[in-house]
Amino acid sequence: MAASTISTVPLRKPPLCLYSQTQTQTQTQIKAPNHSKTHDHKLAINGPSELSGHVAISGSKNAALPILAATLCCSGTSKITNVPSLSDTRTMASILGSLGAEVEVFNDEILVKTDEVRSFEPNSEEISKIRGGFFVVGPLLARFGAAVVALPGGCDIGARPVDLYIRGLRALGAVVDLRDGKVQAYAANGRGLVGGRFQLDYPSVGATETLMMAASLADGVTVLSNVAKEPEVVSLAHFLRDSGACIEGAGGDRIVIKGKSLLHGSECTIAPDRIEAGSFMLAAAITRSCISISRVVPSDVSCLIDKLRAAGCQIRRCSRDNLEVSAVSTDGTNLKGFDIKTGPFPAFPTDLQPQTMALLTTCDGSSIVEESVFEKRMGHAHELIKLGARIQVCASTALVSGKDRGRSLSGSSVVATDLRGGMSLVLAGLAANGTTEISGVEHIDRGYENLVMKLQRLRADVKRLVPAPCPPQQ
């Protein structure tokens, strides 16, 4: 990843949108376009589909959010490219703007200038929309010695407590309390954070990233152990190092950070989204089709590749970042079911569990899906059953009975209640006979850029249903 310090950034055209704090008002006002609300939108899918063609994967949402938060650790301007245009990334831009940062968006490029950041309390309403908004607590506490951040939002898929974040920040010399639905923290020495040692009870990605950002500006050396190893953690470490931080060990069990008093803005290109890549691989499998997928890091989805190959799919690496995925049967045999158990990287990713369950409903035999990360990530099973799937759920484990004696999925009306569960319904709709109508599209919009367009380019019969606007009242 190439990087360079940005002193001035020439702008060739006006930004698509600008997020900043209005200095003349006491209340934060975000200057941004009014993005239309999508809570009443639906997707209509006519199946079964036979996909063909090529799809390019967008930048990773889960990598972009912490990197955008990390710009608060830096002086000057940071340039982040290949940022997906999603409701979550727009919300993070709004959060930065509420703190006083100037955020300019040019298609998939975001410029963040933080020199005018003076506030250490972001807009609570924006924080409540996404889980990733809470990332700013680490940079704010490290930069200002204080932070007041509302508890985060996001999908309702189980308990995601912030106790690891709080205990980790305390290990870096912070006094942290939870009052009135907000985390209120300040440096105990009255100046700033100090290096320390902290072992995570569980390798939480969010806690690892937040503490790594905080430690980058702490006085002294910080050692974090039992940390998350996800590719998104490695991407954040690259950005921080390119900004002047001293970080060693990202991607392993132990990260060592030597704090610096100042970091500078730098350039960063967001890595491809491994969850989107996996979702399209599963789309090829569930429709028994052949497609090519570019901007893929095969090592990031190796666990899924192994499972799909064992099921009977043919996966060929065409170039460094291009895969061909084929589930077209040459001898009339169906794909075979398989078992999965989710866990921290490099285990099977929890964010691909719902989509994989959809595939397993169309495979031969019975499969066991065990969710060990989020205890409430089984809501999609009840919606898949509406499409004819045979699934028995007990706590965080599901028994999926696959295709039997010609039984197939059939279109129906279903509801997406979370991001990845919503995508599982899209995949099931592609394979189902008839029309599947999916409501709750706003959840899917949080994580898949231009999904309808990409599926249409793969020859899927899918469209977005937008209700007609109400006539103005007289």
Image (cartoon, rainbow, N blue to C red):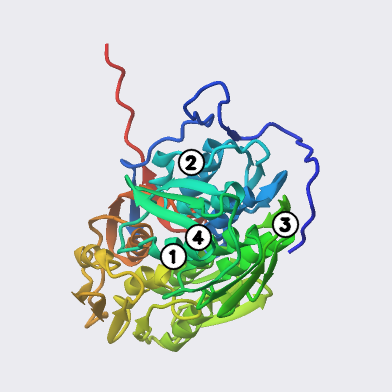
Tell me which amino acid carries mark 1.
Arg
Mark nearer the N terminus (1 vs 4) = 1
Cβ atoms at labels 2 and 1 below 8 Å apart: no
The residue carrying mark 3 is 243
Decide: few, some or many residues near mark 3? Use Cα within 10 Å; few <14, some 14-19, many ≥20: many
Mark nearer the N terminus (4 vs 2) = 2
Q: Quadrant of the rendered structure where residue 127 is?
A: top left
Q: CA distance from mark 2 to mark 1?
A: 21 Å
Q: CA distance from mark 3 to mark 1?
A: 26 Å
Check disc 4 and report its element: helix, strand or loop.
Answer: loop
Which-is-in-front pick, marks 3 and 4?
A: 3
Residue at the spot 54% in from the left edge and 29% down from the top edge: 31
Check disc 3 and report its element: helix, strand or loop.
Answer: loop
The residue carrying mark 1 is 167
Residue at the spot 31% in from the left edge and 79% down from the top edge: 369
Q: Residue furthest front?
A: 189
Q: What label sits on residue 458 in the rendered view?
A: 4
Which-is-in-front pick, marks 1 and 4?
A: 1
337 or 192, which is in the foreground?
192
Q: Say if 26 sits above or below 366 in the image.
A: above
Cβ atoms at labels 3 and 4 below 8 Å apart: no
15 or 411, which is in the foreground?
15
Mark nearer the N terminus (3 vs 2) = 2
